[in-house]
């Protein structure tokens, strides 16, 4: 009973904060053009929008580390490895996020243990752990009578997000962003120069595992929005898009978070209008932003074409003289 009361108190407090955020978001949406605002006049759409914005921002920030550390396969491995935890949590009546975090965390730690204590390389360790975990999840889910929950786990169901899931997502997102802010210097040095970080006395192994668990937390936060299969895209595309436009990590994080939020918002609205899967549409919008950034990047074809035209104009001017 003593354990239940603090949890209930946290959920009540989180619900109050979420309700204030929902009211503020509804107030802002009312100033959008009428066709757009009309789509968000339903309470479930406002709740879905807030969830998508939180997920987009958190995924965007962590996406920078995934891209810079070349951990795309790790993100894919952990996103698939949460499946058995989700299935077990569903069978036991637990919140799916708790089961997913435990399963993903154990897999992340298992990958690091195999890599550092055997001759198996990191990519092989990821392949071994995530395929085994994903297979276990499929076996467990095969015992569940309905396939509806399996579809929600695999592809997300942001339009069906409940208040309790929103509160849990809010807490998880705030925790992830606070950890990034608090350990920013350690993560920065470990990301760009782990050898130097180890030389000056930083516990690089602890930072490595901590970043893995933080990545797991981010993946778990995104489950209800884009699902197990597509969450890896939200952990790669925003950071990859930002890396085309800047080389400074703080700026990269801001751009990446903006891409994540924009993808989630535009994708949610478009999926509602076209009556298609919201998770898939969010990822497609993120990909479209990546293509636009690639075209307009400093080394992209648009900027290069403009430079060639400017140089040609200068040469023609000199020849005329």
Image (tube, rainbow, N blue to C red):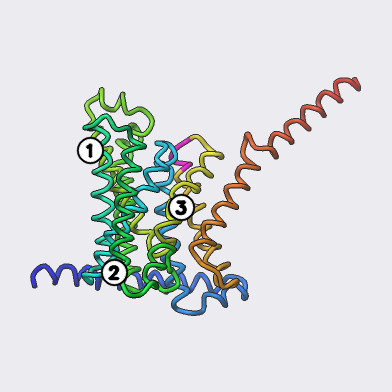
**Position of residue 116 in the picture relative to residue 53 (left or right):** left
Q: Report which quarter residue 146 is drawn in.
A: bottom left
Question: Which quarter shows the N terminus?
Answer: bottom left
Q: Report which quarter residue 138 is drawn in.
A: bottom left
Relative vertical location of residue 152 with respect to residue 178 in this rendering, above or below = below
Upstream in sequence: badge 1 or badge 2: 1
Q: CA distance from mark 1 to mark 3?
A: 26 Å
Relative vertical location of residue 294 with respect to residue 40 in this rendering, above or below = above
Q: Is residue 225 magenta?
A: no
Residue of label 3: 234
Residue of label 1: 113
Residue depicted at x 22% and y 38%: 113
Bounds of the magenta segment: 248-252
Q: Report which quarter residue 319 is drawn in.
A: top right
Residue depicted at x 27% and y 48%: 107
**Position of residue 68 in the picture relative to residue 321 (left or right):** left
The image position of residue 235, as x and y in percent, is 43, 49
The image position of residue 70, as x and y in percent, is 42, 37
Relative vertical location of residue 61 with respect to residue 311 in this rendering, above or below = below
311 and 98: which is toward the camera: 98
Residue farthest to the right, as pictured: 320
């Amino acid at each position: 009973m003593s354990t239940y009361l603090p949890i209930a108190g946290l959920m009540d407090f989180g619900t109050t904060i979420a309700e204030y955020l929902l009211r503020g978001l509804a107030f802002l949406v009312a100033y959008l053009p009428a066709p757009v605002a009309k789509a968000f006049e339903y309470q479930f759409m406002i709740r879905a929008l807030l969830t998508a914005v939180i997920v987009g921002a958190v995924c965007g920030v962590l996406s920078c580390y995934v891209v810079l550390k070349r951990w795309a396969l790790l993100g894919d491995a952990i996103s698939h490895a949460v499946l058995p935890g989700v299935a077990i949590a569903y069978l036991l009546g637990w919140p799916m996020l708790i089961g997913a975090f435990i399963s993903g965390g154990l897999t992340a730690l298992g990958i690091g243990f195999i890599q550092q204590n055997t001759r198996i390389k990191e990519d092989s360790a990821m392949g071994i752990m995530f395929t085994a975990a994903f297979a276990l999840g499929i076996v467990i889910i095969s015992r569940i009578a309905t396939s509806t929950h399996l579809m929600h786990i695999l592809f997300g169901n942001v339009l069906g997000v409940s208040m309790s899931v929103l509160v849990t997502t809010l807490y998880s997102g705030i925790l992830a962003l606070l950890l990034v802010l608090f350990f920013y210097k350690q993560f920065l040095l470990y990301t760009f120069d782990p050898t130097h970080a180890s030389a000056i006395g930083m516990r690089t192994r602890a930072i490595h595992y901590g970043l893995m668990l933080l990545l797991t937390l981010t993946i778990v936060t995104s489950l209800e929005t884009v699902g197990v299969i597509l969450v890896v895209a939200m952990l790669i595309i925003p950071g990859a898009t930002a890396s085309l436009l800047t080389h400074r990590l703080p700026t990269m994080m801001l751009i990446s978070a903006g891409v994540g939020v924009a993808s989630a918002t535009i994708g949610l609205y478009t999926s509602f209008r076209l009556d298609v899967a919201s998770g898939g549409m969010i990822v497609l919008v993120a990909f479209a932003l990546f293509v636009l950034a690639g075209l307009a990047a400093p080394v992209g074809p648009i900027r290069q074409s403009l430079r060639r035209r400017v140089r040609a104009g200068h040469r023609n001017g000199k020849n005329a003289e």
